[in-house]
Amino acid sequence: MKIALAQINCIIGDFEGNFSKIKDYIAQAKSQDADLVVFPELSVCGYPPRDFLEFTDFIGRCKDSVQRIAALAEGIGIIVGSPTPNPNTEGKDLYNAAFFLSEGKIIGEAHKALLPTYDIFDEYRYFEPAEIFHCIEFRGKKIALTVCEDIWNIGNENPLYDICPMDILAQENPDLMINISASPFDAGKAEMRRDIVLANVHRYGIPMYYCNYVGAQTEILFDGGSLAVSSKGFIAGEMLFFKEDLQVFDTEAVEAATRDNVNQTSRIERIHDALVMGIADYFRKQGFKSAVLGLSGGIDSAVTLALAAEALGKDHVLSVLMPSEYSSNHSVDDSLKMVETLQSPYKIVPIKSIYQSFLGELKPHFEDKPFDVTEENIQARIRGTLLMAFSNKFGNILLNTSNKSEAAVGYGTLYGDMAGGLSVIGDVYKTEVYELAKFINRNVEIIPENIITKAPSAELRPDQKDSDSLPEYDILDVILKEYIEGRKGPREITAEGYDEALVKRILKLVNRAEYKRYQTPPMLRVSRKAFGMGRRMPIVGKYLE
């Protein structure tokens, strides 16, 4: 049998566009003599549809699309994901289903049993878990068909669940396993995905064909990397990362594999590619054409510019340089060098006179209080206002340039440098931003070396350095990762050798900045625990106080 895996990039709710794409990929699979073509989880409507699933019309259009796709199943089998109504009077209204289509009709249906309700997932809000499992026969093969999370409870060892669908399906002695997924990206997901698929193959002794989603849905990114694995545990093929792809796998050739054929990419390369895809998809799917950002001469805005120029094209990213009386000459010079290297458009709008005007108007009301964060924030908000003016006047979407380390400890100004329609590196720690800069410069210097090597500074007061009020980033980022991603408390982190007072101060900063993060733009997710929908913390609380 020849099985085509079609990892596609859908748009949530774009039924016509998604159907057209699925139709095109079916035609490609037919042209390569495939017996079966497999599409990802909920590919009919796009993933994750969230509360669109509560609209009767939305579900009706999903049903119509499945019927239209079934009409294309002439001479080829098709597996496609869609929500479907639960006919029972008890339980949730919907199942998360994989439809098996052949010769113009539905010949089988598999419902998702394991419904993730953690981090960014909230599937039990919408779907009823499956309780009945049967293999589907097609062209002499008995197929165990599952949906995404259903293969992540191997041997019923995952404490989140009390059932293992494949253990039940294995009792019918299937010839192969097919899993349709929408498994979100994080920097370590490719290795984890391979391990899970291989663990299933080793447990059941049959080959697996795993079809994953690709593309960005606002902040949630999907990296593709679909897999074909032999019963002996060799990865016969791993499909492209971050790109739509169709590959046809002959089951006999897969079984004959004697070595792994996987994508050899580094962690930082995958983060880079994920961010570029995230920017491009956000703009394309929203119908936006161009971006604007504030280019400060610092590492964060430089990396954001480089990523955006790659994603959108250098002519579609406007950089605005807004030097103040505290800006160093090299900040302006470094920024100019970068935009000239990229041949990207820019504007220079000094803010000194605007800032002095603010201070003059406020002086009678400030009661001769000394210079403090107030004056620093005024500069940031002036810049935010100017950037939004360019955004409004020319239709450019403002890209936020704050990194995860700053967002974590609250080192950002609401309605100033925290403004934007999309946060590009808001899930990238400062130390990783430097890694990204070096990766971007791997072949040719795009980001000037001085931007990478100079000490980071917000330049909002004379001789300001980030290290004046924060530990060095290589220390700060480790503590932040332990707290945010490792979910460790102060005693656990201190026990690893970090200064107790420093740990408590950093963790308090993180908690106190929660109100700011509630007002930030969506952040492209590249870690296991990103700020946003996957990390739900109270704004008001006393933990660590």
Image: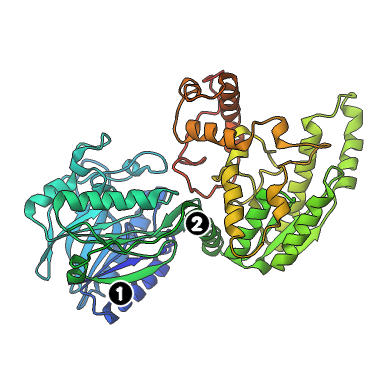
Badge 1: few (under 14), some or many (20 or more) residues near its Cα, within 10 Å?
A: many
The answer to whether 240 is drawn above or below residue 503 in the figure is below
Tell me residue 13's x, y (percent): 42, 60
Left or right of 140? Residue 326 is right
Q: Residue at x 86, y 25 (%)?
A: 370
Front residue of this view, candidates 136 and 304: 304
Viewer can see residue 236: yes
Give the Cα distance between marks 1 and 2: 31 Å
Tell me residue 132's x, y (percent): 14, 48
Tell me residue 64's x, y (percent): 30, 65
Q: Which mark is residue 26?
A: 1
Amino acid type assigned to the residue bearing label 1 in the image: Ile
Front residue of this view, candidates 82 and 166: 166
Quadrant hosting residue 22: bottom left
Q: Residue at x 31, y 55 (%)?
A: 181
Q: Secondary structure at mark 1?
A: helix
> Which residue is identified by label 2?
269
The answer to whether 199 is drawn above or below residue 231 in the figure is above
